Image: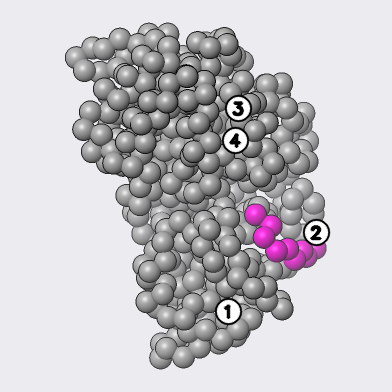
Amino acid sequence: MRAALTAFTLSLLLAGCAAAAPARLTQAAPIVAPVAVVVERDRDRWTADFTLNEDAPVWFFRRSALLRVERTPWRPAWWSVETPGVILDRQGRYDVLRTTDGSPVPRRIRIRMTPRAGDLEADYDPALMFTDGTVALYSGQFDLSPLASIQQARSLPLDLNGISLPGGPAGVTWRDRAGPVLFKGERLTEVTAIDADTYVLFGETRTREGTGVTTVIDPGLPTWLGNQLGEFTPLVMDYYTSRLGPQRGPTPILMVSWTGPTQSLSSMGGSVLPGLISMTFEGDGVLNPDPAALARARWFIGHESAHFWLGSKGLEYQFARDAWITEGGADLMAVRATAAIDPSFDARAELQREVDECVSLARGRPIASAGERGEHRAYYACGAVWSLALEGARRERTGGDFFDVLTDLQRRNGDDGILTREEWLEALTREARDPSLRIGIERMLDMGSDNPASEIARLFGRTGVAFRMEAGRIVLTD
C-alpha cells in the first residue's frame, strides 16, 4: 500500500498489500525437489542462481505485479540474465524466462539483480532500500513455475487463486558475503527456506526491541516519524488486541525504509506479512510533523497493523477481486483505532473521503475488476463504505461496532481463516435483517452503477449511517 500526498493534494494511491495477500494456489502432484535459488550479495553485486527441476520452454514468475506509477513490469529493467540464450520478458500478465529458439530453458540460470525502490500494484515491493546501504528483499519474488508454451503464459489470469499449477514455491538460500542476514528476527550466516513469505535484510541497520513490536528503522528517516512509529504502533497493536484478541504468531517486526526528501511529495507505502510490517516513506512533505502529516502517519500505521487481524494471518479474502473485504475493513479499523487513541483525529473527514472516492470509482465500472484496470484504490474506498454500513447495522441492532462484527466473523470463519464475499454479504443481511441490501453492493461489484451515490445513500439509510444529501453528494453528519 502506498499513500501519496503532494503539496497541493492529500490523495491515497493504495495497492493492495497486501492488499497483497499471497495467492492460495492449488498445487499439482508434488515433485521430488523444489526449484532452488541462491540469492547472494557480494559487495555491490547481487545474483540469483536458479536450479530448475524439470525441462520446460517457459517458466513464469508467479508474482509479476506492475509498477504503480508507470504500470510497467519491473523485472526486465532491474534483472539481467547472464546465461546465454535465455530471455526475461513479459508475456501476458507475467514475467517469464524463455529461450531464444523455443527449446527447454537450461536447468541452471544466473540472473544479475539491481535492487531498487519501487512501489508495485497490489503486491509487496521487491526491495526496501535503506539510506545506509541496507537492503531487504521480498522472498516471494523468486517463485516460478513451468509452462508448455508462450501461449499458455499469455492466457494466465491475473488472479491465480485456485488455479492448478505444477511445482511449488522455490527453496531460496540467502547469503551475504559481508556478514549475517536478518531472517524473521534472527541474524544467520546463511538460511534456506521454502515459502518464507517475508523480507530478508542484508546489512547492519540496528534493531530495537519495544513493547509488542521490534523495529528496524532506516537511520535517515525523519526523527519525528521514527518516534511516531516507535510510540504509536504499540498503542494501535494494544487496541486491536483488546478488541479482537492477540494476533497470531511471535512479536512482529516493523521494518521502515526512507527513500529520501523528494520535492513536493509526501509518500507512505507499506504492507503486512506474517510477523512483519514493512513501511516506506518518501518526500519533503514528511520532513516535519505538521498536523496533516501526523494524522496521515497515524492512520497509516493503524491500517497496516490492522492486517494482522484482517488480512495477512488474520481473516483473508478468497479471491483477489475480494480485496475490498480486507482493505476496506482495515481502513475502517484504522479510523476507529486512531480516533480512540488520538481524540484530535478527524474520523468523519477520513470517512468522507472514502465515500467521495467510492462514488467516483464505482460510476459505470465494476469494483470487482478494479485491479485489472489498476484502480486498486476502489477496493479501499468502497470496502470502507460497505464496512461502515455493516457497522451501522450492528449498532442499530445491538449497539456494537465494527470490531464486534469482526469478532463474530472470527468465530464463524476462524477454522479456515477465509472470509468469502458470500460470508461477508450474509453478515450484512444478518445484522441489517434486510436481504435486499446485498443487491446494491453486488451490482456495484459486478456491473458498476450509473448512480453510485444513490446506491450508497440507500444502503446508509437502511443501516443507520447518518448523512444528508447536498446537490447529489452524500455528506456524513456523524
- Horizontal and vertical percent for residue 99? 45, 85
The answer to whether the residues at label 4 and label 1 have Cβ atoms under 8 Å apart is: no
Distance in Å between CA atoms under marks 3 and 1: 47 Å
Is the residue under label 4 in contact with that under label 3 (CB below 8 Å)? yes
Q: Is residue 271 visible?
A: yes
The overriding secondary structure of the stretch rendered in magenta is strand
Residue 6 visible to an observer of this rendering: no
Instruction: Assign a secondary structure to mark 3.
Output: helix
Q: Identify the amino acid type marked 3.
A: Leu
Q: Residues within 10 Å of mark 1 (few under 14, many from 20)?
A: some
Q: Which mark is residue 110?
A: 1
Query: Dividing the picture into quarters, in which one does residue 378 lie?
Result: top left
Q: Amino acid at mark 4?
A: Leu
Q: Earlier in the sequence, mark 2 or mark 1?
A: 1
The residue indicated by pointer 4 is 310
- Kindly indicate the quadrant of the structure image that contains residue 232: top right
Residue contact at pointers 2 and 4, CB within 8 angstroms: no
- How far apart, in angstroms, are the residues tagged by discs 2 and 3? 38 Å
Q: Residues within 10 Å of mark 3 (few under 14, many from 20)?
A: many
State the residue position of label 3: 406
**How does the figure colour the protein chain or chains?**
one colour
Q: Which residue is mark 2?
A: 188
Gap in angstroms between the C-alphas marked 3 and 4: 8 Å
Q: Answer with left or right where residue 167 lies relative to residue 91.
A: right
